[in-house]
Image (tube, helix red, strand yellow):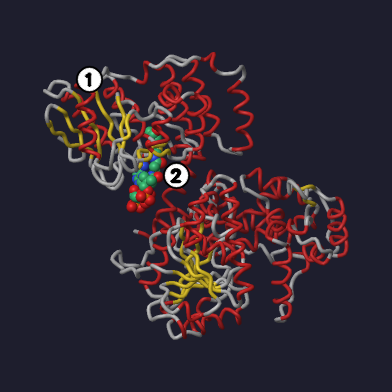
Amino acid sequence: MSSVVRYELIDNIGIITIDNPPVNALSQALRQGLLDVVTAAQKDASEALVLLCAGRTFIAGADITEFGKPPQSPSLPEVLAVLENSRKLIVAAMHGTALGGGFETALACHYRCAVPSAHVGLPEVKLGLLPGAGGTQRVTRLAGVKAALEIIINGNPLSAAEAAELNLLDEVLPDENLREGAIAYARDLVDSGALLKRVRDISIDPGALEPGFFANYRLRLAERARGQIAPDRIVTAVEAAVTLPMEHGLIRERDLFLELLHSPQSRAMRHIFFAEREAAKIRDLPADTPLRDIRHVAVVGGGTMGGGIAMCFANAGIPVTLLEISSEALERGLGIVRKNYATSVQKGRMSEAEMQQRLQLITGSADYADLAQVDLVIEAVFENPDIKKDVFRRLDAVCKSGAILASNTSYQNIDEIAAVTSRPQDVLGMHFFSPANVMKLLEVVRGEKTSHEVLATAMQVGRRIGKICALSRVCYGFIGNRMLTGYARQAHMLLLDGATPAQVDGVAEDFGMAMGPLAVSDLAGLDIGYKARQAREAAGEVLDPATHCVASALVEMGRLGQKAGAGYYRYDPQTRARQSDPQVEALIREHAARLGIPQREISREEILARLFYPLINEGARILEEGIAQRPGDIDIVYVYGYAFPAAKGGPMFHADEIGLSTVYEGILRFGLELGETYWQPAPLLAQLARSGSSFAQWDAARRD
Ligand code: T1G
C-alpha cells in the first residue's frame, strides 16, 4: 500500500483514503497508489468502494508542480479509465474543494456524494488550460452543453447544492460527517441493487442545440475572453462531446489540453498561481512569528477609499469603526458604503440580509476616543503628509498598546509617519487599490522599524479579507505606482510624437491591459495628477512640460476625465462609452508645435515598447534596491493591482519571455532616438541582459 493511498475493508465496503497534504494534489505517487488499490480491490470481498480524502479537502487537482516536467505514468486518464471500468461500484465522497483533476476523478466514479459545505469545479481555465482528464466530456453529458460551457469557461467552484442541481452530484450528505455519510450512502446503493452508472454511457442529443450554437457562442466569447486561447479550446472540446463518441472526444480533449499545457499563456498563468502564494511569504520572517489577534478594526477617513476599506473588513465579518472629523462627513462616508452595498444587492451579488449583516458590522464615529480598544487602525485621509502625521499623533495618544497603526497612503514615507509616534514598530503601510472593496491587491509597506509580528499580522489580515498581498519597502510610490510613472509618462509623450489617445490605449488593450493608460487617467481623474504636479512645483521642482502639458491643459479646460464627461476622450453620459475627440487631437498638435516636437506616424511596436520597457526597467531598479522581495511579487502587484494580463505573467515574467537583451537594447535605442533623460537602463537589467540571464534565474540564484 502506498504512503499516500490507504485501503481498508469495513462491512464489505472498501474505503480508499487518499492522504497527500496539503491539498491531495494528484502527484505521480497518488496516481499510482490509486490505480494499484482499485485494481487490487476488484478481487477482494468488497461489494462497493468509497473514495475519500484525509485532510482539508478532496483532491484539489493535478499536481501543478509537475507541469513542464517529463510526464510520468500512470497518466490521470489511465487511472480514471480503471476507475470507470471497475466491476465494483465506486462512490466518490467529497469535502473541501474538489477541483480540476480532483473533480474529474469523481466524475469517473459511478456515484458522487459530498458534504453540504463542499465545492466542486474545473478551474483549469485560470491556469490557461482546460480539463484534460475527461472533464469537458463528462460534465457536458451530465449537466448539458450550456451549463458545461459556463462552468468550464468561468472556472468558478459550485456549491454542493448547485452541483446536485446540475446532476453533477448524486447525493448531498445530511451533515459534515463525510466518512460515516459516505459509507452509509454506499451501503444503501449496494442494498438497493444500484447499477454501475458510467457517465460515458450518457448520450447527448445534438438536435437539442439551436443551429450554429457553437459558432455564435465563440463570437460572444471573443470579447469576454479577450486574448485568451483556453476558452476557445474549451468550446471545441465541449463541441466534441456532442459530435464525437466518448473515446474520440477524450482524445480530442487530450490533444487540446496538451496544446494549452505547452502554451506561453498557460506557463504565464501557472507562474502567477505560484507567485501569488510566494508573495505571501516574507523572506526574513521566521515561520513561527507570532500574530496579533485582530478582532476590531478602525478606518480613519470615510472617503471613497476609507469606505471601501471598511467594507473589506465588514465583508470578512470583522467589526469596523469608521471615523470621520464630523457627523456630516461621517454621514457622507456611511452613505458611500450603503450605496456600494445597495448596488451589489441590485446586481444580485448579495442578498438584502447579507447587506444588513455587513452594515451592522460598521459603526460610525467622530470621536478618536472610540478607537481606544481597536486592534488595527487604517488611516485613509487626504494624501497630505501633514494631515497624515497629525492623524498618527492622535492615534498614538489614543490607541491601546499593541494596536497596529497602518496608513493607506499611496506615496507618503511610512518611516516619517512612524517617526511622529511613540510606537514606530507598530506602524506600516497597507496600501489598498481603488475601489478598495473590489481590487484584490494589497501592498503591505514595511517601515525601517516595523516589527516582524506587525508585518506577519498585516499579511495574515490581508489574506483574511480576501486580498492578495505583496510586501514593499519604503520608496516613492512603493512598487506599483513607482513603476507606473514611466509607463504613464511615455503614454503622454507618445501623444506629442504623433500617436492619438485611441492608438496608445488600443495597443495597450490589444496587449491585454484591461484599460489603456490614458483611459485609466480619465477614470481616476486627471485632476489628481494635476494637483500632485502643482504640489511638486510649489516645492520648487521644475517639471518637464512634455510629460504632462496636454493632461494639464485638459484639466484647465474642465476636462477632468470620466467624472466630468470628458478628458482625453468624450464619454457617453448613459453608457460612459469613450469616444475620440478631434478637439483633443488638435490640442495635442498645438502643444507639440509649441514644444517644437515634430509629429510622425508611430508604429504599434514602438508604442508597445515605450509603454512596457520603462515598467520593466523600473521593476529592475525596485529589485536591485530591495524594495520588492522577488520578481514574482512585482508580477502579482501588476496583475492584481493594475489589471496587467495574467496570460502574460506580469511585467517581469513577460520581460523574461521576450528576453532581457531585447528590452535592454530597446532602451538603449530609445535613448539614442529620444534622448537619454528617460532611457537609462537599470544596472540589474544591463547586467542580466549582457550575461544572457533572466529575472527568474537571478531570483533563483539568490534563494540558493
Ligand atoms: N498542485 C500543486 N500544489 C498545489 C495545488 C495543485 N493543484 N493547489 C494548491 N497547491 C499548493 C499551493 O501552492 C500551496 O503551497 C498549498 O498547496 C496550499 O494552497 C488534469 C490539469 C485548493 C482552493 O487549479 O485553488 O487539475 O504555498 O495556499 O488558500 O484536468 O490551492 O503552502 O507551499 O492555495 O486553502 C486544477 C489550485 C489543477 C486548484 C486551496 N486545480 N489550487 O486554497 O491554499 S490543473 C486547481 C487552489 C488540473 C486536470 C488539470 C487552492 C485551493 P504552499 P493555497 P488555500
Q: Position of residue 67 (x, y in %)?
A: 38, 39
Crowd band around label 2 with a 10 angstrom C-alpha radius: few (<14), some (14–19), many (20+): many
Q: Position of residue 78 (x, y in %)?
A: 30, 25
- Residue 270, label in figure: 2
The answer to whether residue 189 is above or below residue 525 is: above
Secondary structure type for disc 1: loop
Quadrant position of the C terminus in the picture:
bottom left
Ligand 1 is in which quadrant of the figure?
top left
Q: Decide if residue 562 is on the left or right side of residue 300.
A: right
Viewer-proximal residue among 599 and 465: 465
Q: Position of residue 509 (x, y in %)?
A: 66, 46
Viewer-proximal residue among 648 and 406: 406
Callout 1 amino acid: Ser
Viewer-proximal residue among 197 and 176: 176
Q: Decide if residue 92 is on the left or right side of residue 372.
A: left
Callout 2 amino acid: Arg
Quadrant position of the N terminus in the picture:
top left
Viewer-proximal residue among 516 and 151: 151
Residue at 83% from the left image edge and 57% from the top image edge: 588
Instruction: Judge whether residue 68 can be spotted in this image.
Output: no
The quarter holding residue 375 reads: bottom left
